Image (cartoon, rainbow, N blue to C red):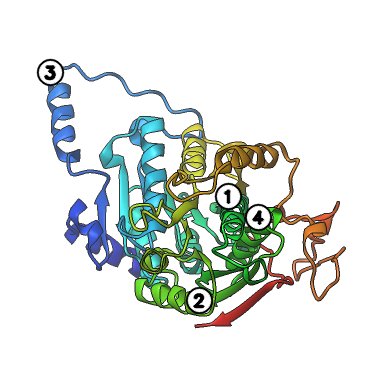
Amino acid sequence: MKLRKLVSVAMAGVMTLSLAACGGSGTADTTAAPAASTEAAADTTAAEAGETEAKEAAPAGGVAKEDLKVGFVFIGDENEGYTAAHYKGAMEMKDALGLSDDQIIVKWNIPEDETAQDAAMDLADQGCQIVFANSFGHESYVIEAAKEYPEVQFCHATGFQAASSGLSNMHNYFTAIYEARYVSGVVAGLKLNQMIEDGTVAKDACKIGYVGAYPYAEVISGYTSFFLGVRSVCPDATMEVKYTNSWASFDLEKEAADALISDGCVLISQHADTTGAPTACEAAGVPCVGYNISMIATAPTQALTSSTNNWGAYVTEAVQHVVDGTEIPVDWCKGFSDGAVLITELNEAAVAPGTKEKVEEVEAKLAAGELHVFDTSTWTVKGETLDTYKKDDGNEYISDGYFHESEFASAPAFDILIDGINTIDN
């Protein structure tokens, strides 16, 4: 056993399994619920009484459900929207597959450094047959863990290196969140039209603001799809994007939203993980669209909806592959047609009349493949319509009249700065 494995085993022996740790700032691992020990004791008593049922036989190459352990490496905790959505997906998987609480082990608040590798390896040492990690910066460390544990499956959200790693046990996954951002943009555009009609906003001053985390393709794809959704119903809109250079900072996100509002933005959206922007919008009386979770509790008069992911769709599928002994896709990305993305509930106190009906229409078209978010007839670059776009991977991303987002790999690839959007750093 290598030194790193010995360290991981030693750490596992001294770690306290406490669900309360998920709310703290330090790293910790927990089972899904504190009742696990009680359930285990009950199982033991039943076994002694000869009342336990025989284990379900595992398929050849698979794992019996009773023997499963599933590990999660999370960048945050349940108080941060992005991780909260991932944890919700983990719990949906647990319920769907009938797993017990002690079969789910979570590592909370794991930073994007070697701690991520240690966490992933410790989960493998604890017997997890499959390990998930949810932050972009975890990827290189998860790959190193996958090299050390070829018998364990490692699944990483938002990354792009699985295919090139040459590892059969390394996988990338993401959702077609750009579809949900487009729909949330439609909601925002309808609100802008209402504001124009009632005289709140001048038609020639219809500028929206966007609080972005980093200038990565993931964020560019997100704010562009949102903007195209807005423009599909409100063609006069323009956008200003302000980066925080942080995935989750309440203060920086609130500060960015305040700055955008001061600069004349009349509606705010975000690709950042806290409630900072909606807090600023509620105070300023500016409508907003969130991400990951509903922001209505934070901005009851201003939050319209949020784009969000159903991570349970992937996690359940991937774990089922382990149970069945079948291959997990190297890259996975699904959208409305598979229930992997959605928008949160519409705030009837804030959205424009007719929003629900329009949302249903657009979602149906996306699910049926009748509507392509990055249709090249709807956007230009320096006044020109693009008919070709090749990246370093050698793929041609524009064909059949639209940019084929997340089709060559699960991670977002759209990194084009289109007309109508202005970006600034924090």
Residue at image coords 50%, 35%: 61
Q: Are marks 4 and 3 in contact (CB under 8 Å)?
A: no
Label 1: how many Cα within 10 Å (few below 14, some 14–19, many 20+): many
Question: Which mark is nearer the camera, 4 or 1?
Answer: 4
Marked residue nearer the N-terminal end (4 or 1): 1
For label 2, the residue is 260
> Between 200 and 36, which is closer to the camera in this rendering?
200
Residue at image coords 43%, 76%: 258
**In the image, what residue type sits under mark 3?**
Ala
Instruction: Give the Cα separation between the discs numbered 2 and 4.
Output: 20 Å
For label 1, the residue is 180
On screen, residue 325 above or below 161: above
Q: Are marks 3 and 2 in contact (CB under 8 Å)?
A: no
**In the image, what residue type sits under mark 2?**
Leu
> Between 83 and 116, which is closer to the camera in this rendering?
83
For label 4, the residue is 229
Instruction: Give the Cα separation between the discs numbered 2 and 1.
Output: 23 Å
As drawn, the label of residue 49 is 3
Marked residue nearer the N-terminal end (3 or 2): 3
SS assignment at label 4: helix
Instruction: Give the Cα separation between the discs numbered 4 and 3.
Output: 61 Å
Question: Which mark is nearer the camera, 4 or 3?
Answer: 4
> Between 142 and 20, which is closer to the camera in this rendering?
20
Instruction: Give the Cα separation between the discs numbered 3 and 1.
Output: 52 Å
Instruction: Give the Cα separation between the discs numbered 3 and 2.
Output: 67 Å
Question: Which mark is nearer the camera, 3 or 2?
Answer: 2
Residue 134, given in percent of the width and then of the height, sits at 45, 58
Residue 273, given in percent of the width and then of the height, sits at 42, 63
Which quadrant of the structure image shows residue 81? Answer: bottom left
Which quadrant of the structure image shows residue 264? Answer: bottom right
On screen, residue 113 above or below 70: below
